[in-house]
Image (tube, helix red, strand yellow):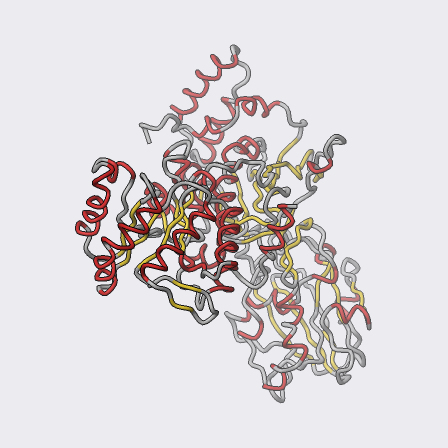
Amino acid sequence: MESEPINNVIFLADSYKISHHKQYPPGTTTVYSYFESRGGRFPYTVFFGLQYILKRWLCGPVVTKDMIQEAKDLFAAHFKRDDVFNEDGWNYILERHGGRLPLRVRAVPEGSVIPTKNVLFTVESTDPVVPWVTNFFETIFVHVWYPMTVATNSRIQKQVIHHYLKQTHDHLDTLPYQLHDFGYRGASSVESAAIGGAGHLVNFKGSDTVAAILLLRKFYHSPMAGFTIPASEHSTITTWGRDGERGAFENLLISFPNGPVSCVSDSYDIWKCCEEIWGEQLRDMVKERGKAGGSVVIRPDSGDPANVVLKCLEILGKAYGTVLNGKGYKCLPPYLRIIQGDGISYRTIGSILEHLKVHGWSASNVTFGSGGSLLQKVDRDTQKCAFKCSYAVINGEGVDVYKDPVTDPGKTSKRGRLALHLVNGNYTTTRADEGDPEEASCVCKDLLHVASQVAFQCPYLNEDNNARPSFVPPLKLSNNTSPCETPVRKLSLIYVRQPTVGNLFSSQLRDNQKIKAKVNYNQKCEKSFIMHHSPKPSSSVGLTHKRNKENEFLCKKNFTPQPHVLKLKRSQLPAPTFSSIDSPRSFLYVQAPLENHCSASESYRTSHFYTEKIASQAIIQDMLVTVFENGELLKEYTLEEIREKAELNINDIDIMKFLSEENS
């Protein structure tokens, strides 16, 4: 760390941010900001790299007395004045928080594939004395644009290769190794090579960027993230001279007698190499190597990629023979392949593979290497990444904060505290303090935390078959804050069955003027996945909120002749006297499906109600997770978890449509 040019977190901000602590309105106690991709080249982003930034720079005690003094001296000289640097604020963080940063960061899980124009993470101050700390660290937080954009670029290329493999080959086994990272030398620094190369390894397992492998080992718990093979470069071939090219190739095969090797073959005449050296003089050595399980990968490195790769395949196919795979496309013997490492991008990969397909060749014959286009031909505007303040607390009141420039509506920012909801497979960014009544959580889901810890009989279960009947609607809550923002506490809940017949609400509920409820019938039931043509049972649900240490959820039977949805506004419940719990670990953020807690009969499992996953499971989940709070990393991801999250799936964009629209 001492050898680094920067080892002081106070220097992680742009110079002008040093002066911002004096510029917020008087009485500001909270600043809340968010990060998003506002659009850009690709229609989605693969979120990756925040964990590296948090662990590398922000975890633990990161502010010391020496750092504060160093910053004070530097900024006095930098600004040519001594009234800019916030020495008192940093001393407060040191003394009050032990040098830990009073920040809370909530983010989507790393590896998530999120459509653009959605919130990806939020940052807010947790100490009202130093609200400015949120946007002070905007600079380092925005650096996540780079690994995220490389991961996105790499995944787009994976989709292109996947598309052609599915069309022209029998299996996808080679896909994880068909795009190799050649970008180490073209990166702007060792650190940028490590960060960008790590983004590529979210999608593939081939890389020559050693720094990326080490970064993933240290920060993402991956003992070995990428693999490679022995390979030649032009210097190891051309030092043998033009007449010694065959000797150089033969030496490579002898030096590494087993396994795969790669040989650059365009130093002088790629066609002569393929026809005479590889196609005749060394053919027997290559075949013998294949019998032992080894292979030779020939690398052309110049010329028009599509035409060069095709011609090399035609020459080698004539010398070694080809076989037709199950889809009718030609394949070289398994011990012979080509790697194209010049001029490779997501655009040219599609052109090359389309050219091969038209001429009857399978996409499995060629592997790609990418350098500059993978790690360097991206910038923050590739995905239009931005970090903006959307909410503040000033003089005790919440204030929406936003920008809306008349000169560029595309830069209009979001307002309020934000949540990212996954609603029926679609991501939507909403205000965390405004829930859609049709997309609110089921009470049963809120109570699963208790259900898993105490003896519990779900009030919705039918006593006869111990299964939740398909005709029983879910009890839903509406117009509430985000589950993670609701001021609640893990209380002991008592579940009571009331066999008596009564009104829709208990007397206690009717007496409580602060609790309002609304019953919606017919068309709104349809939106909540309620079956209209189901039997009409006698069942109802009541809710009682007591001001003592317990809440009682009372379920009453023998009522309600029609299917209904009871919608209660949490915001209208009496405010608790204890502090809020802003964490997905709160019992209001339980993701375990209801069927894991309640058994179900076969008739229930095959019902419309079950197959729609019922509202308590399919409706509204805030995808933002608290990953960092007050200097502590609360959530870590391994590379394998991230890869699984980023894997291709049936919901992916139509990659060929995307390429076609981009070209047009």
User: Which of these two is toward me, 347 or 177?
Assistant: 347
Q: Is residue 39 above or below residue 544?
A: above
Q: Is residue 140 above or below residue 197?
A: above
Residue farthest to the bottom, as pictured: 464
- 402 sits left or right of 489 in the view: right
Residue 2, horizontal then vertical, whole percent? 32, 28
User: Which of these two is toward me, 204 or 517?
Assistant: 204
Is residue 50 in view from this perspective?
Answer: no
User: Which of these two is toward me, 483 or 233?
Assistant: 233
Residue farthest to the top, as pictured: 80
- 75 sits left or right of 207 in the view: right
Residue 508, horizontal then vertical, whole percent? 75, 67
Residue 568, horizontal then vertical, whole percent? 74, 63
Residue 531, horizontal then vertical, whole percent? 74, 77
- 17 sits left or right of 307 in the view: right
Quadrant of the image for the N terminus?
top left
Residue at screen point 55% across, 17% down:
84
Is residue 169 in view from this perspective?
Answer: yes
